[in-house]
Image (spheres, rainbow, N blue to C red):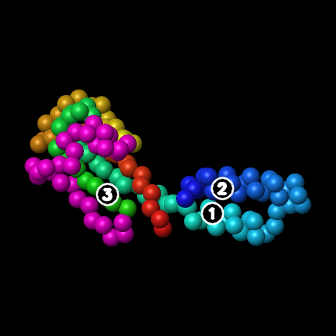
Amino acid sequence: MPTAFEAIDKWIDEARAKLKNGGIQRGDLDQLHQLINANRKHTRQRLLYLHAATPSIRSQVIGMALHEPVQGSVTEIVTEEQEWPYNTVHDAVLDGWQVIHFPDQRTEFDDREIDILGYEFILQKLEDYNG
């Protein structure tokens, strides 16, 4: 079975030949429209907030929140010690996540005295789905 691009390339080649011999018809354009719609994918953005002990991407994760693009999903920051899906931001990047926001490069602090949880990295993963 040809890929979407191969099918569209074939349609274009056939349309070029038809143009030389009198032109394409409305049905030809309908066929192209069907090819495109049959292979259309939608993209969803998943967001992962990782809180690290330092601003380094190799620093230990100390909190996380995963925001799924699903109606009614609930997200909370998890800080209890548990098995994180990633131990570091670098581990998440290796798994296909992209960092879209790096934390401010402020000096080190003791987070027991202020209301900030580590250094927050925001990562995204774009996933295709048929919708």
Residue kind at label 2, given as amino acid type: Ile
Q: Residue at x 37, y 48 (%)?
A: 124
- Count residues near mark 1 (Cα–Cα under 10 Å), then give few for <14, some for 14-19, many for 20+: some
Q: Marks 2/1: CA distance? A: 7 Å
Considering only vertical position in the picture, is 47 above or below 40?
above
Q: Nearer the viewer, residue 13 or 103?
A: 13
- Count residues near mark 2 (Cα–Cα under 10 Å), then give few for <14, some for 14-19, many for 20+: some
Q: Name the residue under label 2.
A: 8
Q: Mark 1 points at which residue?
A: 35
The residues colored magenta run: 70-98
Residue kind at label 3, given as amino acid type: His
- Name which of mark 1 and mark 3 comes first in the sequence: 1
- Count residues near mark 3 (Cα–Cα under 10 Å), then give few for <14, some for 14-19, many for 20+: some
Considering only vertical position in the picture, is 81 above or below 22?
above
Residue 123 appears in which quarter of the rendering? Answer: top left
Q: What element carries label 3?
A: strand
Q: Position of residue 93 (x, y in %)?
A: 32, 40
Q: Mark 3 points at which residue?
A: 67
Seen from this angle, which residue lies furthest right? 22
Q: Nearer the viewer, residue 27 or 75?
A: 27
Q: Which of 128 and 104 is in front in this view?
A: 128
